[in-house]
């Protein structure tokens, strides 16, 4: 069995790129045809990999392995490059996601780390499914529906809203924000997100970060804003940004009086009326059926030598609770 770390997502935030990743598995999509006719022939560097991918695409294959999707980090010599930017393209998601440096470097593919992030995002939202025995990925009915919606359409937005309300961390973030009487930062959210206290879920104390920022020099302030956060804080920031794009959360800019004068502070989040209504629907009420949550086995632990044991133990606990409350 293949054991991977799917389930928690830190970095991807572009829904249009997420859609392209899902369309890799839809052989009727324009992106599938673009991969077959343009991107794979022109961007995949290694001939053997290129031919294998083209064979699958020309036969309208709709399932691909993790390696075919995410790829590796290799230079032109087939070895690990000195710099990540020197890696060549060797997988489908790599050539699907245009890097942020496109305009400055002209490079038209991303790295395998970013590719993995977008794949786990699609898997976490139940748009793609993964077979642990074969390491193959394929599209779900919801993913196919999403793939065939118009870009930026109401139908596309509704599917994304539905998918997020089925994703436990998203509803947990909504709940945390809704219970606060004022807008809160990623640190306040992150401290209550994930398996708190477990390796892989760390958070910085909000008050300590504010005090540090107030007394720091300008170089430190920049680093505090851009680089210093726990893993749970990263999850909180990313999930809140998804919710904000879908109208469930509002983002607020802040200012802080520091030793260097007034500076832009940490972003804060508050719930919208749409978000509060969605949260109530998700939790169920007399008028609404509770929204079934979707999570994978991999979601139940992310770090540690015994993570597979912990995942299995927690899955049995959840099954017990489900049967106790559904009987």
Image (cartoon, rainbow, N blue to C red):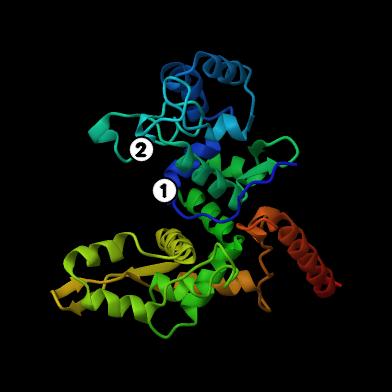
Residue 207 coordinates in the image, percent (x, y)? 36, 81
Image quadrant in which you'd find residue 224: bottom left
Quarter occupied by residue 129: top right
Q: Residue furthest right?
A: 327
Q: Which mark is residue 33?
A: none
Q: Residue at x 49, y 34 (%)?
A: 93
**Nearer mark to the viewer, of 1 and 2:** 2
Q: Residues within 10 Å of mark 2 (few under 14, many from 20)?
A: some
Would you place residue 51 above or below residue 164 in this image?
above
How many other residues sit within 10 Å of disc 1, few (<14), some (14-19) or many (≥20)? few
Quadrant of the rendering where the N terminus is positioned:
top right
Q: Which mark is residue 99?
A: 2
Whether residue 212 can be seen here: yes
Q: Nearer the viewer, residue 176 or 132?
A: 132
Q: Image height check: is 239 above or below 11?
A: below
- Nearest the viewer among 326 and 39 is 39
Residue occupying image coordinates x 80% and y 64%: 316
Q: Secondary structure at mark 2?
A: loop
Q: Quadrant of the C terminus?
A: bottom right
Quadrant in the picture for residue 132: top right
Residue position marked by numbered label 1 in the rendering: 14
């Amino acid at each position: 069995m293949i054991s991977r770390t799917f389930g928690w997502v830190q970095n991807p935030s572009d829904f249009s790129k997420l859609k392209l990743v899902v369309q890799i598995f839809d052989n009727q999509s324009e992106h599938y045809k673009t991969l077959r006719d343009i991107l794979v022939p022109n961007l995949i560097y290694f001939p053997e990999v290129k031919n294998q991918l083209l064979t699958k695409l020309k036969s309208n294959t709709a399932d691909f392995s993790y390696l075919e999707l995410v790829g590796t980090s290799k230079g032109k010599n087939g070895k690990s490059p000195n710099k990540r930017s020197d890696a060549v393209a060797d997988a489908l998601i790599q050539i699907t996601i245009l890097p942020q440096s496109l305009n400055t470097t002209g490079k038209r593919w991303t790295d395998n780390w970013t590719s993995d992030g977008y794949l786990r995002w699609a898997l976490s939202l139940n748009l793609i499914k993964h077979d642990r025995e074969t390491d193959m990925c394929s599209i779900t009915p919801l993913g196919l529906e999403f793939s065939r919606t118009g870009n930026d359409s109401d139908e596309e937005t509704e599917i994304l809203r539905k998918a997020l309300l089925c994703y436990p961390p998203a509803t947990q973030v909504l709940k945390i924000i809704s219970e606060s009487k004022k807008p809160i930062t990623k640190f306040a959210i992150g401290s209550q997100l994930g398996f708190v206290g477990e390796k892989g879920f760390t958070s910085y104390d909000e008050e300590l970060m504010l005090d540090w920022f107030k007394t720091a020099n300008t170089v430190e302030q920049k680093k505090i804003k851009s680089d210093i956060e726990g893993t749970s804080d990263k999850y909180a920031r990313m999930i809140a940004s998804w919710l904000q794009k879908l109208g469930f959360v509002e983002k607020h800019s802040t200012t802080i009086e520091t030793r260097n004068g007034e500076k832009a502070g940490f972003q804060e989040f508050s719930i919208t009326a749409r978000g509060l209504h969605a949260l109530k629907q998700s939790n169920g009420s007399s008028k609404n059926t509770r929204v079934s949550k979707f999570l994978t086995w991999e979601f139940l632990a992310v770090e540690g030598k015994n993570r597979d044991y912990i995942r299995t133990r927690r899955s049995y606990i959840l099954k017990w609770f489900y049967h106790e409350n559904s009987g």
